[in-house]
Amino acid sequence: MVKTNNTDVREKVKQLFTEYLTKRKHRKTPERYAILDMIYSIDGHFNIESLYTMMEETAKFRVSRATLYNTLILLLDAHLVVKHQFGTTSQYEKCFNQETHHHMICTQCGKVTEFNNEQLQADIEGAKLPRFRQTHYSLYVYGLCSKCQWKQTMKLNSFKRKSIAEAKSKVVTKSKADAKGKKTIMKKKQEINKNIKK
């Protein structure tokens, strides 16, 4: 994950989080601010485990998984972090001042790729939804990444080659068996003819 160093955004996010904590009468702990700062230094997605590791190794700040989890809930409620459900795994990413992007998720290897498509974004944002005011959206496209497509093609080609080789082998074996069977029949006919002549 590439890290970003935008102090203006970090200060604004810290201010918004402070306002949120004050309004909701939550404690303003150093752990919560350290977690927020770490999240806003990450470009891309993360999960609880990767955040836990980064807090320990990069920030040199030890926090429990429970503190991480509880702080993430607060950040989600404050609209400073967004949660994504990629198949069976939950991942998070910062969302303040972020441009809209879409996600392609490989159902084979689980790789998540972000992409932008202005036409798609305009269509979704311009959609008239009955009795509903859209504030934001997430788009997930599921399929196979190019690497998994290549692996699948290679596997299929290997299976085809193996099937063809097995089929050829059966034909050759059957031909040999047929030829052997014909020789056996010919020998028996010859024996019968010899016996008849005697």
Image: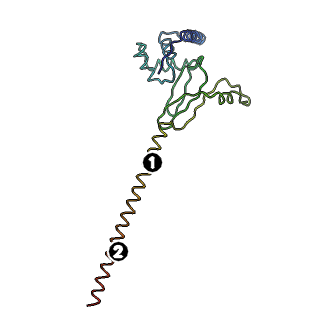
Kind of residue indicated by mark 2: Lys
At numbered mark 1, what does the secondary structure look like: helix, strand or loop?
A: helix
Q: Which mark is residue 182?
A: 2
- Residue 120, by quadrant, is top right
Residue drawn at (36%, 64%) of the image: 173
Residue drawn at (45%, 48%) of the image: 157
Give the crowd class for mark 2: few <14, some 14-19, many >=20 residues within 10 Å.
few
The residue tagged 1 is 157
Kind of residue indicated by mark 1: Asn
105 horizontally vs 122: left or right: left
Viewer-proximal residue among 151 and 43: 151
Give the crowd class for mark 1: few <14, some 14-19, many >=20 residues within 10 Å.
few
Please, which residue is most extreme toward the left here? 198
170 horizontally vs 119: left or right: left
- Position in image of residue 135 (x %, y %): 67, 23
Q: Earlier in the sequence, mark 2 or mark 1?
A: 1
Please, which residue is most extreme toward the bottom here? 198
Quarter occupied by the C terminus: bottom left
- Position in image of residue 72 (x %, y %): 52, 19
Label 2 and label 1: CA atoms lie apart by: 37 Å
Is 75 placed above or below 91 here? above
- Position in image of residue 172 (x %, y %): 37, 63
